[in-house]
Amino acid sequence: MQGTVDLLVLRTLASESMHGYGIATRVRQCTGGDLTIEDAALYQALHRLERQGLVEAEWRPSDNNRRARYYTLTPAGRKRLREQTGNWRRYARAIQAILEDA
Amino acid sequence: LTRFLLRARATLSGGHDRDLRDELQLHLRLLEEEYTAQGIPADQARRRAHREFGNATQFQEVSHDLFSFRLLEDLIDDLRYAVREMRRSAGFTCVAVSSLAIGIGAITAAFAVLDVFMLRGLPVRGPDRLVAFSASGSSTWGSWPYAYFMHWRNSPDRLFEVAAASDVRPHDVPLQGTDKPGQVRVSLVSGNYFQVMGVDVALGRALTDADSPAPGAAPVAVISDAFWERWFGRTPDVLGKSIDLRGVSYEVVGVAQTGFTGHAIGHPSDVWLPLTMQSALMPDGARLLEDRWGTGAHWLRVIARLADGVSVDRAAVSANLIRQRFIADKAAALGGSSPEVVRDRQQGVSLLTATTGYAPERVRYGRPVMILFSITALVLLVACANFTNLMLARSEGRRKEFDIRLALGGRRSRLIRQSATECVVLGFAAGLLGLLLANWAATATLKQFALTIRPIELALAFDARVLGFVSACVGVVIGFGLWPSTRPARSASVASVYQSTSTDARRRTRSIAGRTMLIGQLAMCAVLLIAAGLLLRTVTNLRSQELGFDRNVLLVSVSPGQAGYSRDAAAMLLERIRERLSAVPGILAVGVSGPALLDSSHYWIDGSQLLTTDRGLVLAGARWTSATVGAGFFEAVGMSPVHGRTFDSRDARPAADGVVINQSLATFLFGTDNPIGRRIRMSPRAPTQPVIGVVQDARQTSPRDRGVGVIYAPLRGFNSVVLAIRTAGSPSDAAPLVRHQLGSIAADLPVDNIRTIAEVLDEAIAQERLMSAISLVLAALVVAVGCVGLYALIAYDVAQRTRELAIRLALGATSGQVVSLVLRDGALLVAPALAIGLPVGLTASRALSSQLYGVQPGDPWTLASVAVLLTIVALVATLRPAQTASSIDPIVLLRAE
């Protein structure tokens, strides 16, 4: 679904900076494996967000001392996350309502 | 903006691609480790990691696009590719770029000269509102007496404001604080000159009307920026310094704005002085400001700035009214029948727009410059047509490559863009090279030009105007080259990849386009050759014509005045030289003359001068001039009297007043009557003089002036004279002897170079020689380019037809038949080219007619020789491919197939 990956990435980054692999792992863990992002799509999303100025990237040593590219949410990214979260909730509620009605 | 920066960084550094790779690798490695930890073998883990990841390459591409300028990168790729292609086919590049560079260089050089000489506006405020006063019917600025200027100036209706300026005259002045001689070029101007011209000062103040209170009362000067640099080294404390001219010290009060050197193009002023200093600056001359009725010298250029909203016509009406009122007053004062009033009444005033300033040389050299410009335009066109043909041949040669690339999924627009990039790169390279060439050519031409005209100083400027012009040329060139490069778009289909041999139809289309271009090119060659031929014949005619005097006579300029001889001492010295030289064996006769022969700058030919005879006023159509000659001149140069006698010792007496006239003038003034003893008057206030003899016409003033009347008067001043020496043997052998003899007679007498009349003639026609030389060189270049084009086309055709020709040979055609087949191909190109080129050249050469001498624009001989020449050249160009064709061995070819 359009924008879903973006939202997931933004949400995952909201608490701390992470590298791509970390994000993928976190998403998988949180959803208990129900939701996985294809890795190529994840990186595409990350780079798209970077270009839109919603996340920033920098090279940093990782936990086990490897050079990794860490992504951080920018203020604009936080704003976008709030909007998207709201949108998503409305959307989910709407779908929910329809599903329960039927 | 940040996006732009991100992209720019990514594009420039290429770091983005590396980052991308690193990031992906890390991810894959982490995945791999995870799988290994789960107990999967290493190689399986790697494969699985890759599979899990998805399409990495596509992701990389997409990400790359996100972070870079696809367009810019493509462009850089194209450029790189274009340069590589150009290097690979160095021959093609060389021919294309150099022929284009010649075309662009030639026309740019011509434009630079044209621009500085004729087109550029004066560097002043609002130059388009300036007008110059001229005699009606004249196309150049007039000169006027002070009285006229004052009347226009005091006009009551204020339609224009009038300023006046004298022509620039050089004065020899010792350099500031040294004895070294220097030259200061001075122009006298009215107080409002700077204000009317619209010129600011860089320093100090301009002259004002307050600077002209009374004659001689205001020794102040404004200097030009260039003079400030040259003379004062740009010191800021130049104000208050002084310049000494003719015993008067002029205080510098201002420096004119940079670039302004007066109203005259090619004759810059260093110093401007108030008009009221005229008599101080010219102490020997008349007091021109006191010339109340304008009967004296015409010495001022009158320039006006029109008031806002006033048209040139309206101002001209007003100027004429003012003038008529003045003439009425003048008639009342001098009498209505006085010659000046009669003449004044015949003339009116017209106002010429003065935007581009005053350049008297334009009358004579404007047309040659325009002609050269047109010729160079033709050269550029030929080079462009050649370029099109080259690009056409090239796109043809690469068709297969294009087809394959199309078949492999290359985008069409991308292919076109690639060819176009190549064409643009070639165009720009040619433009750059052309600019260098133009700089050199324009400088060299102007130098030659300046040698032929009296000193003229044109400041060539390769500025925005010229650069703009070059860019326009490059645009045209690229346009010509682009047309064939759009052809891959029309390239048929994948099918054509497989069709390697049946290219017949395609060859025909390419041939039609190429042939048309080539025919046009050859036709333009014909036009150029006709122009060059006519100019060449003009030079030959000028050189070989009957001059009226012997061209083997030696002319020696000597200046006793400069060596300190007084008038009488100089006269005695010259007499002694004549006697001593005549006695030298090998020297037959020695004569003395005033100004040099064949040098029009020493003569003033003007129908408006008031020549009168004892029969009355003669104004209409009398083109005449006067010359001064001393003893023995006519004999020495070989001019014999037709009637009466020439000058002898009787005419050396101061009281003697007889004159000799030439045949043209005698016929004009007296018809068939006997002119001897009749009296003429050279100006209304001059004494009448009897005609004592008539000599045959000679080209006294210039090699072109046929039928100009000449009045020869006895030489009275000897400051600077010309010795004419007739020798028995070869004149050039005698030159050292003459120099030696002169040295022994008067060692202190400076002797200039000794030249024969033939050499002087060559110098006098230097402009014509320059023109014909330039047009010949350009024509030769263009014909060479056309020749190469023709050769290439025919050779290409032969190569394409190898199979056909081989079959013909195999079926029994003789090699002669094959040769004639190919030659016919060439003839089919040359014939239409001549059919177009000759009539066009015939028409175009009419524009040349004012430059020609002794040959008509449509001269059949010239046309015929051009036709023959072009045919021969074409034949030579076709011959080699024809030979190749005839030497095809069908057996070898068929085996190869």
Image: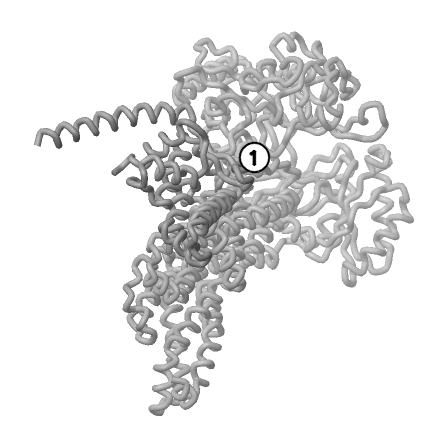
Left or right of residue A26, residue B187 in this image: right
Which amino acid does the dot numbered 1 rest on? Pro
Q: Nearer the viewer, residue B189 or A20?
A: A20
Q: Is residue B136 above or below residue B376?
A: above
Could you say whether the residue bearing mark 1 is in a helix, strand or loop? loop
Q: Residue at x 60, y 22 (%)?
A: B165
B820 to the left or right of A95: right
On the image, the x and y values in percent for residue B353 come to 46, 27
Residue B698 at least partly seen = no
Q: Position of residue A21 (x, y in %)?
A: 43, 41
Name of the residue lying farthest toward the left = A102
The chain containing the residue under callout 1 comes to B
**Residue lying at 51% horizontally and 10% vertically, measured from the top left:** B154
Quarter of the rendering containing residue B897:
bottom left
Q: Is residue B424 above or below residue B618?
A: below
The residue under label 1 is: B360
Q: How many marks?
A: 1
User: Image height check: is B91 above or below B750?
Assistant: below
Is residue B825 visible to us here?
yes
A17 or B183: nearer the viewer: A17
* Mark 1 neighbour class, 10 Å CA radius: few under 14, some 14 to 19, many 20 or more: some
Q: Is residue A74 left or right of B271 when viewed as pictured? A: left
Task: In this rendered view, identify the residue nearer to me: B124 or B552.
Answer: B124
What colouring does the structure picture have?
one colour
Give the position of the N terminus of chain B as an image quadrant: top left
**Residue B521 x, y percent position in the rendering:** 42, 60
